Amino acid sequence: MSDAPADDFGALVLEIVDAIPPGQVLSYGDVAALLGSRAARAVGTVMARSGGGHPWWRVVRSGGHPPRGLEADARPHYDAEHTPLLSSSTGLGYRVDYAVAMWKPENL
């Protein structure tokens, strides 16, 4: 990873999020795990406070559901990036096909 201090959890979270390629996603828990943490909620807090300047739609809830309350805002991003989606009976009727769209970083 880059120049972020090792103890700057928020900067490291955003660095990982920025590295997720278009059309792929990670869960909050997976982002935390890449940092050697189990703090999925802390990842969510970082994302909520980031001001939307990062590809927030590429970080999903377990099961591939978009960030809570942002399902409608996330859909155009998924469509534009050709993120694989599945129908769902919850929310707005869709979720990311996590098994297909999960990013598997090689150099983190």
Image (cartoon, grey):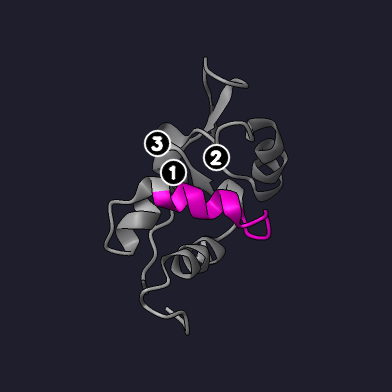
Image location (x, y in percent) of residue 103: 43, 55
Residue bearing the label numbered 1: 100
Reply above or below: 18 against 79.
below
Residue bearing the label numbered 2: 84
Look at the numbered disc 1 and give the secondary structure of its residue. helix
Q: The residue under label 1 is which amino acid type?
A: Val
Query: Are discs 3 and 2 less than 8 Å apart at CB?
Result: no
For marks 1 and 3 on the same chain, the one whose residue lies earlier in the sequence = 3
Look at the numbered disc 2 and give the secondary structure of its residue. loop
For marks 2 and 1 on the same chain, the one whose residue lies earlier in the sequence = 2
Q: The residue under label 3 is which amino acid type?
A: Ser
Neighbour class for label 1 at 10 Å: few (<14), some, many (≥20)? few
For marks 1 and 3, give the CA distance. Answer: 14 Å
Query: Are discs 2 and 1 less than 8 Å apart at CB?
Result: yes
99 is within the stretch colored magenta: no
Residue bearing the label numbered 3: 62
**With 28 as the anchor, is 95 left or right in this view?**
right
47 is within the stretch colored magenta: yes
Q: Nearer the viewer, residue 1 or 80?
A: 1
Which stretch did the figure color magenta? 42-55
